[in-house]
Structures are given as structure tokens and as C-alpha cells.
Image: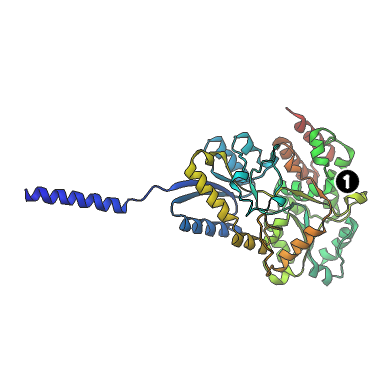
């Protein structure tokens, strides 16, 4: 009897102990992010996720990270496998069409507190005003010429107003071992977003030429569009853009700029977050591309811009109340005032999409981005915001071939036209 009683007590104690140690199952929140773990942004992301989980012990964030084209490939593969993320980094235009095709876009407005988010800088993204993602920041300028004013001053050069001014810089800078413009041309999207999207309106005279061409009003075989494409070879032949651009991996142009090996860097406004040296920041000026031959006055100093991408809650998250609750907490934390202020200060964004005051301690590069944004009068279309993927891929490859002299503008234009009209 005594043995039996001890056994019963032991079992009871075991049950009690088991009950004390048992953990309540966590809510799994699947997130896919467009970030590079080797950069400061990637490190900041890891810190954010760790801190979020510490403050929300009931949530297990399972994040997938990839950057650039690798991100798009990974996102497509997850969607194809029906392994839907609950929160995703989303482009609300043609670049993120695969989320729409997978039926994973959902209006995020019901999850966005109007007392927190600044709806005046968050444009509608769907036909009925839907917001598919919370933009990381306002106005994503994609064609920015970063200028090292200290280099220009050292060699007696002035801020370029025309393309001819850039050409005139080639010899004196080359003699000093410095390239005029450094651009990461091994990535097709850089030619697309950062160069050609800025040039097309200059040659055509229409800030919405790209979207109108996709709609059928214009054609990618039109003379003015072909002039813009041909200008790529002109820049290479003139030495303004080194032929080595075709094998320059993304990030190398920034390194060249930081190390004084290039007077200019052509990229999007987001690249400012890589300019961390306070001394260099004071010598950086952000410029629109200079006036090109034949450019009309209406397009002077225009800059291409798209709706800024950001994180959005997907349809998959709305299927489970616990997951949706965790997703809303995650979004609110990522767009908290402290973190937005940090991204504003380090140059990642131009201006916030939440209601907050401008930090009093913005560094020079952030102030320069604000100045640049206020100086731009005309914003123009971005190619990959409107072109269907097949036509966009053909254009990206075609521009690289033009630079290498392996294709003509007419040949590339014809391919893009054919693919853009294909059903």
C-alpha cells in the first residue's frame, strides 16, 4: 500500500512539474524580407527581430532573408509552393505582381491606425484605393546622381548642368585615376530603374511616357525611345560610363564612390544609407541627371520615382486571428517612431510614412536627401513599375548588350515592343 501511495504521489508530482514546465505553443509568424545580412540594414533587421521576439514571447518569427533579384526568386518559389508568408516585403506595382497572381495581396488599411500612419504620403495602390503594403518611406527616387563635391573642387570642376559637362570631366579625372560615373551594371535592374527610367522622359518629353507606352499610346519602337536607348552606348563611348560597368556587382559602385575612385555614383536615393563617413557626407550632393542633347525644358531636372516598397500583411495572415494579431504587432513595431527615426537618420528613407516630427539631429546625408526631395518639381515613371516581367527582362538584358555593342537600340526596342503586347 505504501509503495502504491508513493507511486501515486510521484505521478502526481510529475504531472504538476510537467504542467509548470510546459510552454504554451507560440504563434508562428512567417516573414520574408528584402535585406542583405552582410550590411548594416541586414544587421539592424536581425536586431529588430530579436527584440520583437523578446517583447512578444508568444510569437516565433520565422524570417527568410534575400536581397535584390534573389529576393524576387525566393518569394516566387515560396508562393509557387504555397508556403505563403504572413508578412512580406512587397513592391505594389509590376515588380511585385507575383503576390497579386498568388492571391496574397490584401488591403492593409484596416490594420493601419490613422493616428499613427500618415495617409497623405501613402498613395493608393489598388483600383479601389487599397494599400497593399506600408511604404518604408515617402517618394522613392530611383535615378539619383550622387556627387562628391570635394573631388570636383580638387580638380577645378563644376557641378554638371549638361551632359557635355560630364564629357569634359573624363580626361582630367581619368588622368587622376578617377572614373566619372560608377554604376553597378552587372544588375539589369540598375540600368532599368537608375539610368533609363531617368533618361526616357528627357528624350520623349513626357513624364508618363512609360506607362502610356505600356497602355498602347506610344510604342517601344518610337524614335525618341530608341534615342534614349542609344544614349547608353554614347555614354560608354564617351568614357562617362566605364565599360567595366557591365561587370560591376551591386555594392561596388558605392565602394568606388566612398574610396574616391569615382566622382559620381548613379543609383537610387536608398544608396545614401551606405554613406556613413560624416566627413564625406558633408561633401555629397544629390543631383538629377544633367540635361541631355535635345532635351525639352519641360523635363529639366526631372527624376524618376516610384511608390516606395515596404512590408505588408498578406492574405495568409488573415486566415488565423492569432497570426493576424501577431502580424499587426510586428508591423506596428517595425514602423515605430524610434526605428523610423533611425532609418531617417541613416539615409534609408527620404521622409517617414508615420506621423512624427523631424529629428533635430539629422546627419548631413539625411538633410541632403530632404533638400533634394524638395528641389524636384517633375517626377517621372519607372520602367519596372509598369513593364510586364518578360518585357522588362528583355529590356534589362538588351541595355547591357547595347553597352557592350552587341545589340542595337532598334533590336532591343523591337523585342520589348513584341513582349509587352504579347497576351
**Count of numbered marks:** 1
Res 370 quadrant in image: bottom right
Residue at far left of view: 1
Position of residue 149 relative to residue 389, above or below, is below
The foreground one among 193 and 130 is: 130
Position of residue 3 relative to residue 40, above or below, is above
Where residue 27 appears, as percent x and y from the top left, is 45, 47
User: Looking at the image, which residue is at 46% across and 46% down?
Assistant: 28
Res 337 quadrant in image: bottom right
Residue 344 placement, left or right of 80: right
Where residue 73 appears, as percent x and y from the top left, is 60, 42
Residue 406 visible in the current orientation: yes
Which residue was labeled with disc 1?
203
Where residue 301 appears, as percent x and y from the top left, is 86, 55
Residue 396 visible in the current orientation: no
Residue at far top of view: 423
User: Looking at the image, which residue is at 70% across and 56% down?
Assistant: 270
Please rate how many residues cluster around mark 1, counting C-alpha atoms within 10 Å: few if below 14, some from 14 to 19, many from 20: many
User: Looking at the image, which residue is at 77% across and 69% down?
Assistant: 283
The foreground one among 130 and 45 is: 130
Where residue 179 appears, as percent x and y from the top left, is 79, 61
Which quadrant: the C terminus?
A: top right
The foreground one among 267 and 157 is: 267
- Give the secondary structure at mark 1: helix
Amino acid at each position: 500500500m505504501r509503495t502504491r501511495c508513493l507511486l501515486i504521489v510521484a505521478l502526481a508530482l510529475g504531472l504538476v512539474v510537467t504542467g509548470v514546465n510546459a510552454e504554451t505553443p507560440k504563434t508562428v509568424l512567417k516573414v520574408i524580407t528584402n535585406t542583405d545580412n552582410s550590411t548594416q540594414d541586414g544587421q539592424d533587421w536581425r536586431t529588430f527581430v530579436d527584440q520583437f521576439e523578446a517583447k512578444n514571447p508568444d510569437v516565433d518569427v520565422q524570417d527568410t532573408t534575400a536581397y535584390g533579384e534573389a529576393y524576387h526568386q525566393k518569394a516566387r518559389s515560396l508562393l509557387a509552393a504555397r508556403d505563403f508568408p504572413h508578412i512580406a516585403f512587397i513592391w505594389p506595382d509590376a515588380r511585385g505582381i507575383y503576390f497579386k497572381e498568388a492571391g496574397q495581396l490584401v488591403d492593409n488599411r484596416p490594420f493601419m491606425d490613422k493616428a499613427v500612419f500618415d495617409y497623405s504620403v501613402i498613395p493608393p495602390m489598388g483600383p479601389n484605393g487599397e494599400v497593399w503594403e506600408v511604404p518604408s518611406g515617402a517618394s522613392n527616387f530611383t535615378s539619383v546622381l550622387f556627387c562628391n563635391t570635394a573631388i570636383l573642387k580638387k580638380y577645378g570642376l563644376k557641378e554638371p548642368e549638361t551632359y557635355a559637362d560630364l564629357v569634359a570631366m573624363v580626361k582630367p579625372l581619368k588622368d587622376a585615376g578617377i572614373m566619372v560615373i560608377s554604376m553597378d551594371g552587372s544588375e539589369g535592374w540598375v540600368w532599368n530603374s537608375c539610368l533609363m527610367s531617368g533618361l526616357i522622359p528627357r528624350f520623349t518629353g513626357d513624364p508618363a511616357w512609360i506607362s502610356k507606352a505600356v497602355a498602347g499610346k506610344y510604342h517601344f519602337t518610337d524614335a525618341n525611345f530608341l534615342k534614349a536607348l542609344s544614349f547608353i552606348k554614347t555614354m560608354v563611348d564617351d568614357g562617362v560610363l566605364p565599360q567595366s560597368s557591365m561587370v560591376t556587382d551591386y555594392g561596388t559602385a558605392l565602394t568606388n564612390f566612398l574610396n574616391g575612385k569615382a566622382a559620381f555614383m548613379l543609383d537610387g536615393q536608398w544608396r545614401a544609407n551606405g554613406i556613413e563617413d560624416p566627413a564625406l557626407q558633408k561633401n555629397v550632393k544629390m543631383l538629377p541627371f544633367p540635361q541631355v542633347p535635345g532635351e525639352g525644358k519641360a523635363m529639366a531636372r526631372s527624376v524618376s520615382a516610384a511608390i516606395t516598397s515596404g512590408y505588408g500583411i498578406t492574405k495568409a495572415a488573415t486566415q488565423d486571428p492569432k497570426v493576424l494579431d501577431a502580424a499587426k504587432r510586428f508591423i506596428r513595431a517595425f514602423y515605430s517612431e524610434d526605428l523610423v527615426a533611425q532609418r531617417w537618420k541613416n539615409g534609408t528613407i527620404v521622409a517617414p510614412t508615420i506621423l512624427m516630427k523631424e529629428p533635430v539631429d539629422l546627419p548631413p546625408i539625411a538633410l541632403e536627401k530632404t533638400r533634394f526631395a524638395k528641389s524636384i518639381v517633375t517626377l517621372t515613371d519607372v520602367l519596372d513599375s509598369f513593364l510586364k516581367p518578360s518585357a522588362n527582362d528583355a529590356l534589362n538584358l538588351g541595355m547591357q548588350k547595347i553597352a557592350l555593342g552587341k545589340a542595337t537600340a532598334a533590336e532591343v526596342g523591337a523585342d520589348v515592343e513584341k513582349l509587352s503586347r504579347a497576351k
